[in-house]
Amino acid sequence: MIYDLFTYFYIGLIFIRQRNNFMTEVLNIMKKVRKVKVSLKSRPTVEGAGVRLKRAFGYADDSLDPFLLLDDFHSDDPRDYMAGFPWHPHRGIETITYILHGKLEHGDSLGNGGVIEAGDVQWMTSGSGIIHNEMPKSNKTDSLIWGFQLWANLPASHKMMEPRYRDIKKSQIPEIQLKNDNIKIKIICGVIDGVKGPVQDIITEPEYLDISISPNSEYIHPVKSGHNVFAYTIEGKDILMIRKRN
């Protein structure tokens, strides 16, 4: 069993075990833990020009701020996705697209364009406004496409900032291994053990991690106080999330 955690601001608890005062440490930590607020199950929906996907959450609940929406498009039937996402506008948010399998062709009103392939990320800051499109590329020998798009709110002070676009290739994303290779982490944005992800200088100071955890293992990661956290599980079960207040 492998867990893949798809996160923006990630979760964490620093757990320090000392031989002589173990119970004292446990009690101190328990006073600083915030448990999971809500657990959601994705729902089928249709987006774009008729793409069938699963929506993990939408923007009806402002308690998830700055997270607005997370969509999971995953199908090996071209009829579910080939209509794609033709030209459409965004403003005041960031859209983060992460592809696990297949290819997505894109372009925008700034003149950017290209193809996002397996392992690649597109991080777009719409700011004062941008128009773009995202269209799946057909493959006669492999029809599977799988990816995610996250929408993140920009703070009021930066909603009208200059739009910008980042195309991050798989080869640019470092992967580290911890605890005898039981934990593998792809660092898209953030820092772990001194290793930085390629996406930096983001206004909301996020972390975006793709984590695989082997059976009977755990990963403990600190997070800044006041940051909202979510994890999206694409394989596995029984993920427990707790948080240390700084």
Image (spheres, grey):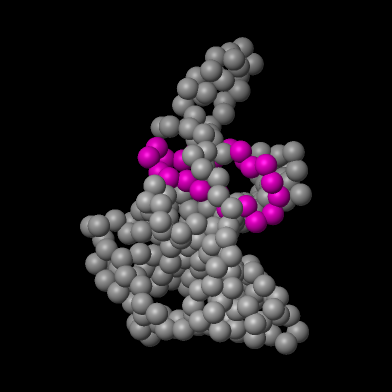
For the stretch drawn in magenta, what is the main secondary structure?
loop
Query: Looking at the picture, how far across and down is residue 167, in whole percent?
Result: 48, 73
Q: Is residue 205 visible?
A: no
Q: Foreground: 79 or 175? A: 79
Q: Foreground: 54 or 120? A: 54
Q: From the viewer's perspective, is 18 left or right of 1?
A: left
Q: Say which quadrant the C terminus sits in.
A: top left
Q: Which residues are magenta?
A: 219-240
Query: How many numbered circles are shown?
Result: 0
Query: Looking at the picture, how far across and down is residue 52, in whole percent?
Result: 59, 73
Is 240 placed above or below 232 here? above
Q: Residue at x 53, y 52 (%)?
A: 7
**Magenta span has 163?**
no
Q: Residue at x 64, y 42 (%)?
A: 239
Query: Looking at the picture, how far across and down is residue 225, in whole percent?
Result: 40, 37
Q: Residue at x 54, y 79 (%)?
A: 50
Image quarter of residue 175: bottom right
Q: Is residue 125 visible?
A: yes
Is 11 placed above or below 115 here? above
Q: From the viewer's perspective, is 13 left or right of 3?
A: left
Q: Residue furthest top?
A: 20
Image quarter of residue 55: bottom right
Query: Looking at the picture, how far across and down is residue 48, in whole percent?
Result: 49, 77
Is 77 placed above or below 160 here? below
Q: From the viewer's perspective, is 48 left or right of 118?
A: left
Q: Residue at x 49, y 39 (%)?
A: 37
